[in-house]
Image: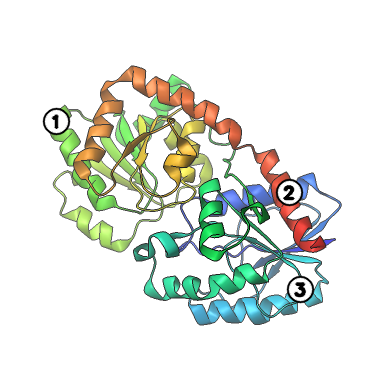
Amino acid sequence: MTIAVNTRINKETQPEGYEDFIFELLDQVVTKFPQHQFIYIFDAPYKNMVFQKNVTPVISGPKGSSSLRLQYWFNYRIPAILRKHNAGVFVSLEGICSLRTKVPQCLLLSDLSFLNYPALLKKSQARFYTKFTPAFLAKARSIATVSTLSKNIIADHYKIAAEDIGVIHPSVSAVFKPLDWEEQEIIKEKYTEGKAYFLCNTNSNLINLLKAFTFFKKRQKSNMLLLIAGNIDETFKKELKTYKLRNEVKLLEGLDKAELAKITAAAYAMVYPFLYDELALPVLQSMQCNVPVVISDAGALPVVFGEAVLYFNPENYEDIAQKMMLVYKDEAKANELVKAGKELLLQHQPGKNAELLMECILKAANN
C-alpha cells in the first residue's frame, strides 16, 4: 500500500519538539513496515534529512500558515498529489484533513490549545481550528491523539465514541541520555563557565519565569544560571535587555538535537512554565537524561506525569520559585523524581508508538 503523509509541521501552532517527535515516529514506522511505500509531502525544501528506501519525498507549495494558504494546500494541492501517486491512505499529523479528497484519512490531533487556551494562538489560527476541526474529525476515517485526557476531551466535546480514538504517547529520541560527571562538566564549561544551571525549553510564560528566577536568586544567593533553549520571540528578547539579572540568563537558539541533548543532560533541573501543552516533550527528554523536572500544573500533564515531577501554578512566579528552591535544596527529592521519571518512561516506548500509528493508518484504509 502507498501511504501519503503530510510532513508539513507548523511550529507556530505545534508544541516544542513536536517536529522531532513526528520524524522519529515516522522513521520507526517506515523501518518496521518496509512492505509499504511512503510519500512524504513537504511544503518547502527539506534539509539534512536521509530517508529509507521505501520513502519518496515530494515538495509542494505554497509554504505558509495563513488559513487561506492552509485550505488551498490541503484541499487542492494534497488531492492532486494523492491522485498522482495512487495513495491508499493519507496521514495528517497536525490536526488538519483534506476536505476535497475521497482517499481515506488518518488524523493525529495533537494540540487542543484552540479549545483550552486560545489566547496562546493568533486569533486567525484559533478561528481556523475552531471552525474546521468538526469537519476534519467527521472526514477522518481514523483519529488518534497524544494522551488519554486529550482523547476524553475530543470524545466529549465532539461527541465521538472514545473507543474510536487511538492514543499515541509521545516518545523521545535515544540521543537524549544521561552524561557522566566529566561530560557534564565539559558542557557547563562551554556554556556557563562551569556554573550549574536550570534549563527551560519553551517559549511560553517566560516573563513569569524571569520573575521566579529573581525570587530564587534573592533567597538562595547561589551562582545558579538560567538557560533558555528553543525558538524565542523578539518581544521576550527586548524584555530581557531590561532585566536586572540578564547576565545570568543565556538564550540558546538554533541548537541541533545532539547539542540540546547534552545541554539537557548537564542541567541541574528542567523548569517548564508552559501555559498549555499536550506533549511537553522537553519534560520527557529531561527524564530520559535523569534530570529532575518542575513543571506547570496546567492542561493534561498532571494526568500524564503523575508524581514524576514537581508542579507549580504557572501564573504565580513565587510558586514557580518555591519549587525551584525545593528541587535545588532537597537532593533526596530530586533523586526521587529521577527514579519516578524512569518508571514513567516505560509507557513511552518508540516501537510501540510505531505499531499504534500503523494500526490507526490501517484502520483508516480498511474502514
Circles 1 and 2, Cβ within 8 Å, touching? The answer is: no
Residue type marked 3: Leu
Residue at coordinates 66% horizontally, 52% vertically from top-left?
163
Outermost residue to the top: 332
* x and y, in percent, of residue 122 in the image: 38, 70
The answer, for residue 302, to whether it is visible in the render is yes
Residue 215 occupies which quadrant of the picture? top left
The disc placed on residue 257 is none
Residue at coordinates 63% horizontally, 57% vertically from top-left?
161
The answer, for residue 179, to whether it is visible in the render is no
Q: Which residue is mark 2?
A: 29
Circles 3 and 1, Cβ within 8 Å, touching? The answer is: no
**Mark 3 or 2 closer to N-term?**
2
* Camera-side residue of 141 and 74: 141
* x and y, in percent, of residue 149 in the image: 51, 48
Question: Which corner quadrant holds the C terminus?
Answer: bottom right
Residue type marked 2: Val
* x and y, in percent, of residue 183 in the image: 45, 25
Relative vertical location of residue 43 with respect to residue 348 in this rendering, above or below: below
Residue at coordinates 63% horizontally, 52% vertically from top-left?
23
* Camera-side residue of 269 and 313: 313
Secondary element at image label 2? helix
Residue 265 placement, left or right of 363? left
Q: Which residue is mark 3?
A: 82
Residue 154 occupies which quadrant of the picture? bottom right
